[in-house]
Image (cartoon, rainbow, N blue to C red):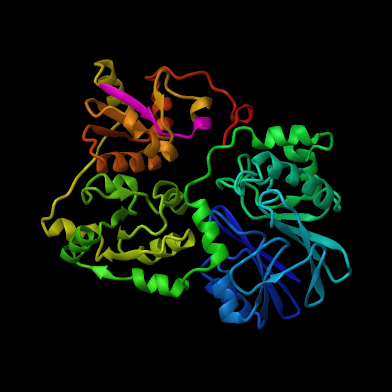
């Protein structure tokens, strides 16, 4: 028997490859299926099942392409109603895989169809739990994503409490827990950077598994401090439930290298959003006017999903040469399939062509301190609320990047805005969005809050440990 976790840092997502005697089950695959197919082929094994823990909100799963290519059965737990052929398992049903079995545990709460998969080895021992978004390391799944007219967040949290206590906490302490996500995912609020653990450890250290916890306490603590989910989440759920184009079709459509003239014409004719995926400090030195910078080096796909509300929005890409395929793939992972093409050769040919470019001014903390001493403008902190609450420049305004679109009207256009985040990635995203919306007096603070604090030139609020805050 072989278990392999395939972890994708950009999405903080774990997919799983389980193999026994030439048969394979893939749990929660990403949309690009080639790694799973190749891994099975190299082992001389056949992919028998594609097991889905629920209808994912934060990424588009590869279940349809994987089933089409390999003939594997797609499996969901009870209450799932997909618009395609799938096996809807019953609670407690056991799926044979080589010499092992996989038991389906229906664990509603994160969503009503949410299910975990319990691996039972050749000796009958309960060995590993693939817990999806029901149980994370250090946290549990947020219960606010599947609300309906007759089902509130508190209702879902109540279901989750019962699922954890009756289906998961009764398992042996030495069962290994393999969750669907780790730290950085918006599917929970307090996840560990660890990507697996024993159930016994989680019973000791996971706040939501306290043995003495009442249902009322659980509901209050699990729902407290939840920030609104990214806008693309329900659109990804719909794609996972209803179906989508093959990723091969999507990648082929987007792989059009466009000359500067053709790129400009496409932007003008279609109204496509120009998405520049280069690093922030390269972007600021020169970019196409009205383009948005979200660098591939950070949590690219989740930020695209958070800040570009419609997954069907047409896009044109500016990338570092050679990174176009990576950008297309990472966009497809979260359902952004309508890429019209990319600027051939990157930004260089645009610059050489003599077409209009824009730049962003960056200043050091030392320069910022000097300019603020002359009351030149206003500092805007775009970090998350929890980061801001833990420590910030005294008296500054916090507009988290994820809420910038909703709060943009609060920002004055008649004064200089100095924008900072923690290290510089998010601040450049914010500056690029504001510039595209007509804000001219924008300055990025090099090095972000880390550099500001180290400079010793600003009054910083007393530090509050993040574990004492409701921080996502």
Q: Is residue 162 magenta?
A: no
Q: Is residue 61 visible?
A: no
Figure disc tally: 0
Viewer-side residue, 306 vs 192: 306
Height in image: 95 above or below 115? below
User: Could you say which quadrant of the image residue 277 lies in?
Assistant: bottom left
Q: Residue 356 location, x and y as percent? A: 14, 51
Q: Quadrant of the C terminus?
A: top right
Tell me if 387 is positioned left or right of 268 in this view.
Answer: right
Q: Quadrant of the N terminus?
A: bottom right
Tell me if 240 is positioned left or right of 400 in this view.
Answer: right
Tell me if 428 is positioned left or right of 172 in this view.
Answer: left
User: Could you say which quadrant of the image residue 142 lies in?
Assistant: top right
- The structure residue drawn at horizontal position 24% and vertical position 29%, both measured from the top left corner, is 413
- The structure residue drawn at horizontal position 32% and vertical position 32%, both measured from the top left corner, is 409
Q: Which residues are magenta?
A: 377-387
Q: Residue 58 location, x and y as percent? A: 54, 54
Tell me if 173 is positioned left or right of 406 in this view.
Answer: right
Height in image: 282 above or below 70? above
Viewer-side residue, 299 vs 60: 60
User: Could you say which quadrant of the image residue 269 lies in?
Assistant: bottom left
Viewer-side residue, 57 vs 454: 57
């Amino acid at each position: 028997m072989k278990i392999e976790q395939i972890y994708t840092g950009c999405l903080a997502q774990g997919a799983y490859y389980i193999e026994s005697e030439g048969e394979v089950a893939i749990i929660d695959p990403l949309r690009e299926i080639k790694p799973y197919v190749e891994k099975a082929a190299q082992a001389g094994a056949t992919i028998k099942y594609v097991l889905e823990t629920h209808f994912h909100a934060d990424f588009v799963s590869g279940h349809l392409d994987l089933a089409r290519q390999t003939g594997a059965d797609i499996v969901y737990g009870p209450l799932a109603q997909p618009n395609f052929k799938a096996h809807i398992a019953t609670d407690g049903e056991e799926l044979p895989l080589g010499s092992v079995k996989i038991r389906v545990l229906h664990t509603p709460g994160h969503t009503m169809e949410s299910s975990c998969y319990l691996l039972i080895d050749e000796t009958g021992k309960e060995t590993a739990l693939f817990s999806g978004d029901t149980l994370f390391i250090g946290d549990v799944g947020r219960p606010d994503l599947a609300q309906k007219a007759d089902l509130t967040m508190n209702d879902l949290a109540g279901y989750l409490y019962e699922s954890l206590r009756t289906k998961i906490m009764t398992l042996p302490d030495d069962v290994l827990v393999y969750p669907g996500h780790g730290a950085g995912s918006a599917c929970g609020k307090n996840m560990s950077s660890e990507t697996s653990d024993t159930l016994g450890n989680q019973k000791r250290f996971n706040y939501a598994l306290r043995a003495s916890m009442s249902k009322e306490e659980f509901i209050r603590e699990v729902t407290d401090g939840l920030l609104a989910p990214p806008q693309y989440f329900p659109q990804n759920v719909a794609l996972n439930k209803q179906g989508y184009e093959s990723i091969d079709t999507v990648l082929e459509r987007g792989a059009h290298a466009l000359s500067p003239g053709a790129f400009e014409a496409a932007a003008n004719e279609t109204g496509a959003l120009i998405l520049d995926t280069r690093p922030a400090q390269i972007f600021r030195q020169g970019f196409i006017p009205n383009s948005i910078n979200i660098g591939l080096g950070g949590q690219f796909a989740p930020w695209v999903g958070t800040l570009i509300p419609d997954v069907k929005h047409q896009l044109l890409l500016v990338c570092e040469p050679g990174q176009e395929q990576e950008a297309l793939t990472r966009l497809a992972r979260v359902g952004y399939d309508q890429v019209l093409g990319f600027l051939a050769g990157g930004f260089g040919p645009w610059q050489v062509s003599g077409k209009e470019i824009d730049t962003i001014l960056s200043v050091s903390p030392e320069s910022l301190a000097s300019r603020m001493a002359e009351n030149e403008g206003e500092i805007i902190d775009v970090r998350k609320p929890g980061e801001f609450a833990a420590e910030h420049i005294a008296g500054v305004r916090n507009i988290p990047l994820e809420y910038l679109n909703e709060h943009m009207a609060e920002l004055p256009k008649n004064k200089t805005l100095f924008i900072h985040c923690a290290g510089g990635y998010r601040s450049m995203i914010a500056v690029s969005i504001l510039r595209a919306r007509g804000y001219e007096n924008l300055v990025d603070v090099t090095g972000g809050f880390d550099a500001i604090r180290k400079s010793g030139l600003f009054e910083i609020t007393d530090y509050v440990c993040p574990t004492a805050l409701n921080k996502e």
